[in-house]
Structures are given as structure tokens and as C-alpha cells.
Image: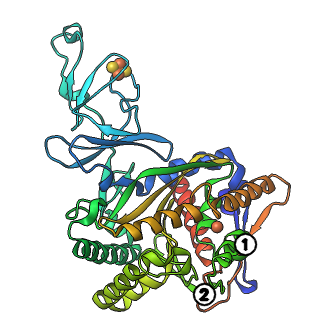
Amino acid sequence: MDIADLIVERESEGYFAYHRSALTSEEIHRAEIERIFNHSWLYVGHESEVPRRGDFVRRTVATRPLFFSRSQTTGDVKVFYNSCTHRGATICRRDRGNQKTFQCFYHAWTFDTDGALIGVPDEECYGPLFDKSKFGLVEVPRMESYRGLIFASYDPNIEDLTDYLAGARDYIDAMMDAAEVAADFAAGSNGNGNGNGDGAGGPALQVLRGTHQYGIKANWKLLVENSFDGYHLGPTHATYFQFLKDQKVDVSPSTGSMKLLGNGHAVIEYTGSWGRPIARWASQFGDASRPQLDALRERIVSELGETGYRMAELNRNLFIYPNLFVMDNNATALRVIEPTSVGYMDVAQHELAPRVEDPTVRKVRLESYVTFAGPGGLATPDDVEALESCQQGARSGVEWSNLSRGYFSEEPPMSGELQMRVFWRRWQQQLLAAEAVRA
Ligand code: FES
Ligand SMILES: [Fe+2]
């Protein structure tokens, strides 16, 4: 089937559907990697994961092995392809650590943290013209960071990251600003940051140690849809709502809205009866955290006004096209969706927290995150089941998936599907545009 035929939209009828081969075709998956992932800004990691010189973290980003490290000489972060310039072995073979140099385990070529080749066993065998400076580790063509979030692009000609982020920037800024107030507040209220952070410097929101990683036997786009799908909350997550109810939390249904942010990015913002570690107390958090959370909420609202109120009170799932979500609800997590193969995705979730936080609040944050969004929590396994069943259904012979909900709504509801339609349209445009360039 031609890419142009994969989406059917009939405006007068308010009908939008995509063909399910988009979830099952190997050929389409290859095209996505080449035409979408190779020409987007992709989230790699967070500056707070490499706080000291020589720190490094290994990642796979759109099927390519990478690692990033903080230079021993300049303190800057660089993102490298994880492949030796000799014969290709992966250089970085641990998920994280700290090193003065990187030595390839195969024939022991050695690189410094800026990627320069500094050691070659039996170098004389390469002859007098061998020039080590030509065989340094290769950096990704583009790397930029925004408020601590490190992105890379395999496309040297891509627009700057700040332009690419478009309207998503305002939301990242608002979350970071609220975290900044929270960190100052915690540092002030307990004097020294209480061992939860360094108390000063670095991005306001930091990634906590420990990443949740899990696989889903489904196409990556199904988790994109699911991660900003307000429609499924009640039916799919009945277990979680029952759990809240059992803890005397009032579980009135969420209400909210959706906003398109340009370049395929979008956000849903909604009320929730559950608590938010920044900063909305609810009974499931227990009485110990209440004074801190109430005081923090007051401080955020007084310093940031309306934005502060939204950050304290409302939940949001912010999508940064093509595969990153900031899930800011019961806790705040970065969800990165790796398109491993057509029928399988790897998911990484990194928990974010203000760089200094009161221990009682940190405790409810961690519990709240693990309880809801962790791979063994009360939400994620239900989502995994839903997505894997969609993937199975995609091979059934029923050919089209319907994304028409809210087509005629003037104010897009959070339970509508406009955000998904916009995602799919951009997806198709990118596949088609690259096809046109090749022709
Ligand atoms: S492949 Fe790395 S030294 Fe040979
Ligand atoms: Fe869900």
C-alpha cells in the first residue's frame, strides 16, 4: 500500500482512520527510521545523569548505540556513536560509570573523554602516515540541550532545537520554573538540601538514579497514542481508581483540555483526584507530607501566579515528537519510546525531581511513581496489555483504526483524538516528503 493511502480523512463526515499495516509492515518501519527518526531531534539523556567530569551513560537512540560523557578537560557533554573507529566494536559497554579514558576491549585502542584517539597498541605497524587525529570517536552530527534535556539529531541540517521544540518550550519552562521554586524552598526550609541533591547549580529538575526499562510487543506508535489518550483512563485503569478509592481519595473523573504545540508536539492538561508531589496533597500521601506540600504549593503559586497554580494543581502529558513524553501526573517522568522493531518497542522511564526536595515529599514522589507508572505499577501493565492486544488485532484482517473522536469539537477535549490525528498527519508528511526528495 502506498504511504499516501495509509490515512483516510473525510472532513465533512468527521472521519479519520489509518491503515493498520502502519503497525505491521517491516518496510514502513524501515522508512520511519530513515525518514522520521534520522531527521528529528531525539532525546538522549539528561545533564544531571553525568554531573562529574568523566561520567558517562550508554543509550540506544532510534536503533543506534550511543553514549554521552562529560569531558575531563572542558566539562562539556558530548554524544558519541558507540562504535570503535578501528573495526566497530562498541566502546562503552556499561550503562553508566566514570572513566578517564575509554578503551576498546577488542584491540585496545584508547580514546579520551573528548573522543580523541590517544593509544594504539603497536602503532608503528600502521606505517609513518598513520594519523591518530583522524580516528577519534565520532560525535552525532548535532547535539543540543534545553534546560538539562540533551537531544541529538542524525541530521546535520535540522533546525535548532529551540525552534524545533516550538510551543513545547513553554511547558518545559513552566515545569522547570516550578521545580526551581521547589528546590529553593526545600533548600531554605531544611538548610542544606538534606542530602537529596547538591543544593545548588545544575538543572532544576534532575533525573533520579535508576531507570525503569521494559519492552512491549507492539508498534511504538501505539504507545505514542496511549501516552496522551485521555479517553482510556476510566476503562483501562479501573484498578488504579479502585486503589485510590480504597485510600479515601475522591475519584471524580478528570476534566481537561488538549493543546497543539506545533511540529507534532501536543499536551493534555487535566485535573486529577490523586496527589502531585509538586504540589497537591491528597490523602494517599499520608499526613506526614501535608504541611510541606501545602506550604510548597503556596510558595509556587505566589511566585509564579497562574502558571504556578497550573503546575501545582494540574497534571499534564507533554509529547515531544516523535518519541518523548514528559508524564507529569502522580509524579514526573520522562518516557522515551524506542522503535526497536516493527512489532516491538523498548520503553525507558526516568523519574524527575527537583534537585533538592524535602524527604517526606521525595518519599511520596517515589511511591507515587512506582505505584502508578512503574512497570509493575497499577497502570503500566494495563496499558501494556491494551497495546499488545491492539498489535495482535492489527494482524486480524480488520484493516483500519479509527481516530475520529472529537473531530467537530471546537475546544479539543483531553479525551479527544485530535492530538493523535496531528501526530499521524506529521508522520505521513515526513514519510512522503522524503519520498519526493528521492524521486
Ligand atoms: S575494534 Fe576497537 S580496537 Fe579493534
Ligand atoms: Fe494508561
Rendered image quadrant of residue 244: bottom right
Q: Is residue 221 depicted above or below 329 in this figure?
A: above
Q: Residue at x 39, y 56 (%)?
A: 208
Q: Locate residue 267, reporting x and y percent.
A: 51, 76
Task: Using a 10 Å C-alpha cutoff, classify the residue at mark 1 as few (fewer than 14 neighbours), some (14 to 19) or many (20 or more).
Answer: some
Secondary structure beneath label 2: loop
Q: Locate residue 65, reporting x and y percent.
A: 44, 39
Q: Which mark is residue 255?
A: 2
Q: Residue at x 71, y 50 (%)?
A: 24
Rendered image quadrant of residue 249: bottom right
Q: Is residue 229 depicted above or below 48 in this figure?
A: below
Front in this rendered view, residue 414 or 271: 271
Q: Residue at x 31, y 63 (%)?
A: 160
Q: Locate residue 281, reporting x and y percent.
A: 48, 81
Q: Residue at x 27, y 77 (%)?
A: 185
Q: Amino acid at mark 2?
A: Thr
Which residue is at the far front?
A: 288
Do labels 2 and 1 touch, CB within 8 Å? no
Q: Is residue 339 left or right of residue 398?
A: left
Identify residue for label 1.
238
How far apart marks 2 and 1 lie (CA) works out to 17 Å
- Which quadrant of the picture is home to ligand 1? top left
Q: Earlier in the sequence, mark 2 or mark 1?
A: 1
Q: Is residue 363 depicted above or below 213 in this figure?
A: below
Front in this rendered view, residue 212 or 401: 212
Q: Amino acid at mark 1?
A: Ala
